[in-house]
Structures are given as C-alpha cells and as structure tokens.
Image (cartoon, grey):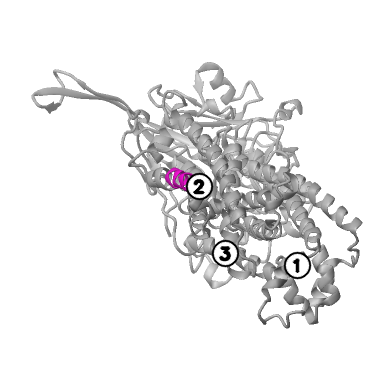
C-alpha cells in the first residue's frame, strides 16, 4: 500500500473533469440560446444540436464528482439531507436538478412538432417511440407554435441564468475553501464562467463540424461557423483579461499575500510542476486560438475552425487542471510541494476521464438516433425516402420541418 | 492525575478510584447510552464472528490493507458509531456556530498543549492510533519537530569551518498537532450532506454512516486535520476521544503524554486546569488568520516557528507524517 503521507492531492482527475464538463454544459446551452434570447436567427440550426450536447454533458457532469466521492452509493443523501445554503456542493444538487428539469423541458418543446409528425406518420418502433415523446400532444396549430416559441424563450432565459449560476457555483466550490490560498479567490466564479462559455462555444464548433458535416445531408453553414468563431474571439478576449487579472493577483509578490504568491510562484513559475501546463497549454493555446480567430479564412474553414476549437478545449481543460490540482499542490501544514502524477488506470485516473467522455459521446450518439434533430433525417424516418438505412434525398433538407 | 471534574454522564466518577476506572467507564457508557438508542436495531452489535470472512478477519490478516470491505462493527475492531458520537443527545450544529454560546452549553472541551514540556516521544500518536483504530498512512494527531536558533560564531565553539569557530545555538521544539475543534469550523459548513457536525460541548465529529466521502471537508480544513479513511472510505478526524470524554476520562493522547504536555479540560469551567493555564500563561493558536477560532491552545511556542511553507523560514526539521509524498522545491523567494 502506498503510504498516503500527511498531505496529498485529495481531489484528483474526476474533479478536474467536473468543472470542465459543467463548463461545456453552460457554454453549449448559451450557444443554443443565442437565437432565442438574443435574436440571432442565423444560429437557429444550432439550437437542437446544442440541447442534445447540453443534455449529454449535463448527465456526465454529475457523474464526475460522484466518481470522486468514495462513498458514492450514498448519493441520495444529497437530496434527503442537503446542507443548503451553506455547502457549495450542497448547492450543486439543487442547481443541477433544476437544470436537468429545464433541459428536459426544453427538449420536449424543441422537438415537439417533429415528434408529433413522426408519431403520426413513421412506422414501427419509431412511431411508438415518438408517440411516447409527445406525451399525448397533437396540437401543431399556429397558436401552439407561438406558445412553443414563447415557452422556449422563457426556458432559454432561465437556462442562461441557471448556466451562469451552475458554473458560478463551481468556481465557488473552490473559492469557498479558504484553507487553499490559490482557491480562496473572489475571481473564481467569473473566471470559471468565462472559460465555461469559451469551452462551450469551442465544443459547439467541433460538434457542429463533426455532426452536421459528417452526418447531416445539409452542408456546413460557413456563416454559422464564422459567427461562432467571432463570438469565440470576444469571449477569449474577456477570458484572457480575467486570466491576466488572476496572474497579477497571484504572481506578483507586491500585489498579493505571501501565501498566494509562494504557492503560485512555486507551482506555476518556470521550474514548477505545472509551469508548462499553465504557460503553454492554458495561456499559450488560448492566445493561439485567439490569433486564429482573427483570420477570415480560418473562421470559415471547418477544419481550421475545429482545430481552433480543439485548442480552446485543451486550454480550458488545462485551466481546470491548473486550478484544481495546482491549488492542492501547495501544502497546508508541511513544506515544499505535494507531489502528484495522475495515474492511467484505476480510481481517480485518466481511465475514469475516458469513461466519462465515452458516456457523453454515447449519450450524444443515442440522442442523435432517437431525437428528430435534423430535417433530412426526419424526412427519412417519415418513410418518404424509403427505410432508415436508405440514401437521404438532399432536396428534403430544404423542407422546413415544424415551421 | 488531573481529570476534568464535571462530566455529562449520570454516574458519579471518582478519579482516585483507579482500580474501578475500567468498570466505571463501561457502566457510564452503558447508562448514558440507554436513552439515546433511537435506532436499537442498528445499535445491537452482531454476533461474534458473524459476517467475518477469512479475508477480512484480523486474526488471519492483521494488516489494514486486507480490510477491503469494512463494516463499521464492533467485531471488526471499529467502535459502534451509533452509540458513540452523541450518547447524551446534545444539540448538534452544522452551521451558525455562534448559536452555541447562546445555548448555554454545560461544557466546552478544549486542549492546552504546553510545548515546553513536549519531549517528542510520539506516545500520543501511538496511543491515538491504538485507541481509535486509525489506519496505516493517516493520522489524527502527529508531532512535528522544529529547530529554532542558528549556528553562531563563537571563539570557543566546537565547530571549525575555514579557520573560524562556530557553536550550534539551537533548540529542538516538538509541536504536537491535532484537530483544533474550532469554534468556527470551515470543514463543517462545507459538508453537503450534514454528515459532520459540532456538538454543543465543542467537539467536531464525523458520522461515518452518513459521509459520502466527497473530500470537501478534507480540503477545507486549514490544519489538514482531516483525512479520507482508506478503510471506511469516509472523512475521518480526531474526536477528542469522544467516548472517553463522555465517560469522564481524558483523551488517549492526554492520558499517555509522558511530559504532561497535553492538558484536556472544560474551558467553561474557570477552575479547570486548562482555564487556569490559559489565564496564567500567554498562549497561541495555529493559523489564527483563518478566523476559525481554534480550541487547541499552545503555551511556550517559540516565536521563531511560523506557519510559512518555506523550509528556510518554517524551521521544520522533520515530521513523521508528511515526508512520504512531498518534494522540496527550490527557494522561489526572490523571483519578480
């Protein structure tokens, strides 16, 4: 048995994935709500895809802290004996539950008309499945569509506020622990919210290129890519600004407390254990992505936009790693630094992270097959173009479904 | 021997009757626990040997590592937590700790550690591990060893370096460390499932039958007094040997302290030894800047010892408990 020592890293890789995944939730939800809340109708094709992505990552985001808790079979106590409002993790289950109810409601309304059509016209199990999803609703009158839109706008506004709360409290989970000098920082919630939005836009760029470009009959709309990349550019600017403020407040001895400076300089300055992680992966890649968004050619190219998105995702994951692991590398009562190398297999390992990612991808794939997210697929499922496996006629994509 | 005179148990306890100590302890626990059995089915210990497989039987596998699937039962070597945490049903607090003084508690347990008397024998560490069945690799109390002073030039010194003579003007200071049972414990506030609590008499406890092991409290404690128990897979910490305190005894580390460096008692009682010591001598607490109001007071600490993590400043020589996993980094004081 490995001796634990007095101090070691208590929150390991699953807790790194937890703010990362919940950041993807918050960001992708905001991207999906752009058309409804901010009237940016060119992002309307992203709405259905983003709600699918949001739902998958939302489910997995709850599994990450559960993977970290060593008595995870007692998860129900979070509902029966929740310590609110004092415990930041106690707030988690409240916001998460509200959020998953909201996303499920949004899924119902956003897919309602398509589900009604499929329940009426599709064949076999798909008819029964979509009939189930309609919850008995058959109303596709103009009035009901207006009501759907109004409900979706309300849900999107509430969801954006919840997304900010959802990720703000994730910053609070760390910011509330005054024992860790590098965590106990009022900048934590805004820092986490901004990087959440950045990573959410990036994951939507990648998902749009992969899913829309790879599976759909519709070509990739370069205008959407261009818009997302411009949105990404401004959000990265704000995020880098907050990173810079954080650096000023932690890495300059004249501006900060001794404990914060000691920990920050020992961990993140050249020679420290997370120096490459911080300067190259977290800041360098984000800066690189920012520069890439300046070029119109990159913004409109699916390949290069995806590469930019991946760079942002790696950068944000590195930011989560630096925050969660870096804060724990500073000892509370002993000297030097706590040593930590993530393991490949077993508890709290990369294997857990790959498992979480696999669950997310599985959920996204399952949702794509079971939910009417794409007009040409709906046309195929309706049976006009033949059975499911047959070639999708490209002309069907122009048919505005449910509109 | 000093023993805090007043105690919550209904059975009167006379510290002079040492031979009856053990029976008095058993009797007090039994009598005090009777009205507290709200869940008698859980409180009943299982029959000896039941549910014990060869793999987890300490007779065949005495190491902690073999106890893969712990049941917190008496026959596993664990205390029966349903009786032990709060037999008198004292009010417990998960937050708003400022209400505890308003509730007029009968006792306020605290500890005074007289650093002048500690010889660094580690008997407290051993007795704590033994009393509380603390697994390998984790500690509820530990004694760090510091060195104050310096090597100073002295014409009569016995150290000869480059033709100059020096003398070691140093003192070794052992600092026993333990959960501070803070009056404003951040570890209790952050628990998401109210598994940890502060009893009205000041003792901060974890209920291992409720803890989900999320580790928030372990990270929230500025003194690193909590750990995740590798056997029970829950957060765990010093209990001030609550079962002994409820029986009118001192904690195990206090009983075993050879120099009587650790003194335990009722801070509410002005005549208790802890109160008199705190009145008579200047005392310090660990990390007062966190505002946790620690209830473990140190007398006779050298002012040279700081809480700074820099090895050159902190003057820690070694600790029995933290060197296994830590690395020492270069001095980064002069950067920027």
> Is residue B238 something that shows in the picture?
no
Q: Is mark 1 on a helix, strand or loop?
A: loop
The nearer-to-camera label among 3 and 1 is 1
Cα separation, mark 2 vs mark 1, equals 33 Å
Report which residue position mark 1 lands on: A399
| Front-lying residue, A161 or A384 | A384
Residue at the spot of label 3 = A210
Q: Say which residue appears at 80% left-offset and 82% top-offset.
A: A124
Question: CA–CA distance between discs 3 and 2?
Answer: 19 Å
Region in magenta: A283-294
Which secondary structure lies at badge 2? loop
Judge from the rendering whether residue A170 lies leftward or rightward of residue A326; answer left or right: right
- Chain of the residue that carries numbered disc 1 in the rendered image: A
Is residue B95 at all visible to an observer of this figure?
yes
**Toward the viewer: B268 or B32?**
B268
Residue B189, image quadrant: top right
The label shown at residue A293 is 2
Name the main secondary structure of what is drawn in magenta.
helix
Which quadrant of the figure contains the C terminus of chain B? top left
Query: Label 1: few (<14), some or many (≥20) within 10 Å?
Result: few
Give B115 or B199, whichever is nearer the viewer: B199
Q: Position of residue B191 (x, y in %)?
A: 65, 44
**Alpha carbons under labels 3 and 1: distance apart:** 22 Å
């Amino acid at each position: 048995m490995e001796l634990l020592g007095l101090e070691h890293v208590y929150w390991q890789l699953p807790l790194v994935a937890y703010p990362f995944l919940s950041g993807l939730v918050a960001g992708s939800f905001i991207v999906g709500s752009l058309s409804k809340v901010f009237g940016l109708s060119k992002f309307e094709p992203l709405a259905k895809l983003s709600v699918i992505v949001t739902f998958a990552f939302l489910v997995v985001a709850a599994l990450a802290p559960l993977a970290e808790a060593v008595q995870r079979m007692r998860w129900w106590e979070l509902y029966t004996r929740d310590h609110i409002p004092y415990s930041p993790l106690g707030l988690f289950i409240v916001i998460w539950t509200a959020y998953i109810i909201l996303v499920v409601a949004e899924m119902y309304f956003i897919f309602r008309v398509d589900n009604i059509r499929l329940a009426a016209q599709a064949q076999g199990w798909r008819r029964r499945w979509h009939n189930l999803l309609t919850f008995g609703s058959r109303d596709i009158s103009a009035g009901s569509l207006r009501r759907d839109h109004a409900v979706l706008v309300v849900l999107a506004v509430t969801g954006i506020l919840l997304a900010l709360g959802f990720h703000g409290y994730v910053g609070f989970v760390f910011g509330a622990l005054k024992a860790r000098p590098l965590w106990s920082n009022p900048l934590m919630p805004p820092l986490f919210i901004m990087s959440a939005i950045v990573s959410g836009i990036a994951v939507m760029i990648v998902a749009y290129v992969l899913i829309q470009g790879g599976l759909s009959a519709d070509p990739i709309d370069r205008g959407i890519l261009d818009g997302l990349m411009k949105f990404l550019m401004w959000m990265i600017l704000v995020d880098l600004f907050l990173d810079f403020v954080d650096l000023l407040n932690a890495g300059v001895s004249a501006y900060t407390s001794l404990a914060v400076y000691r920990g920050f300089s020992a961990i993140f300055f050249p020679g420290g254990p997370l120096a490459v992680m911080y300067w190259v992966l977290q800041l360098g890649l984000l800066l690189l992505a920012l520069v890439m968004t300046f070029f119109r050619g990159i913004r409109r190219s699916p390949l290069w936009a995806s590469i930019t998105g991946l760079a942002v995702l790696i950068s944000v994951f590195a930011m989560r790693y630096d925050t969660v692991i870096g804060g724990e590398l500073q000892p509370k009562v002993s000297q030097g630094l706590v040593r930590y190398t993530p393991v490949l297999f077993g508890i709290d390992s990369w294997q857990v992270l790959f498992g979480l990612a696999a669950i997310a991808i599985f959920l996204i794939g399952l949702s794509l097959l079971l939910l009417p997210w794409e007009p040409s697929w709906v046309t195929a499922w309706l049976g006009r173009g033949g059975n499911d496996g047959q070639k999708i006629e490209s002309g069907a994509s122009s048919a505005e479904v449910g509109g | 021997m000093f023993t805090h005179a007043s105690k919550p148990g209904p059975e009167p306890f006379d510290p002079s009757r040492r031979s009856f100590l053990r029976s008095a302890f058993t009797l007090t626990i039994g009598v005090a626990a009777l009205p507290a059995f709200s869940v008698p089915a859980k409180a009943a210990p299982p029959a000896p040997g039941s549910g014990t497989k060869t793999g987890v039987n300490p007779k065949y596998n005495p190491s902690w590592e073999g106890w893969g699937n712990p049941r917190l039962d008496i026959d596993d070597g664990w205390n029966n937590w349903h009786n032990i945490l709060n037999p008198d049903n004292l009010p417990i607090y998960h937050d708003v700790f400022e209400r505890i003084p308003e509730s007029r508690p009968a006792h306020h347990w605290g500890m005074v550690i007289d650093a002048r008397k500690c010889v660094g024998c580690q008997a407290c560490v051993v007795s704590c591990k033994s009393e509380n069945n603390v697994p390998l690799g984790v500690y509820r109390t530990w004694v760090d060893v510091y060195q104050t002073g310096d090597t100073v030039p002295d014409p009569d010194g016995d150290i000869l370096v480059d033709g100059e003579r020096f003398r070691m003007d140093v003192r070794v200071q052992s600092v026993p460390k333990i959960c501070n049972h803070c009056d404003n414990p951040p570890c209790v506030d952050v628990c998401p499932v109210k598994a940890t609590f502060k009893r009205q008499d000041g003792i901060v406890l974890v209920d291992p039958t409720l803890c989900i092991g999320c580790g928030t409290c372990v990270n929230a404690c500025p003194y690193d007094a909590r750990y995740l128990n590798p056997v029970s897979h829950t957060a765990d910490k010093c209990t001030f040997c609550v079962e002994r305190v409820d029986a009118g005894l001192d904690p195990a580390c206090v009983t075993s302290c050879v120099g009587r460096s650790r003194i335990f008692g009722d801070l509410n009682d002005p005549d208790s030894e802890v109160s008199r010591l705190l009145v008579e001598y200047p005392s310090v607490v660990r990390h007062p800047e966190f505002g946790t109001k620690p209830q473990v007071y140190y007398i006779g600490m050298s002012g040279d010892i700081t809480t700074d993590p820099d090895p050159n400043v902190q003057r820690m020589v070694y600790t029995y408990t933290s060197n296994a996993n830590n690395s020492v980094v270069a001095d980064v004081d002069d950067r920027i």
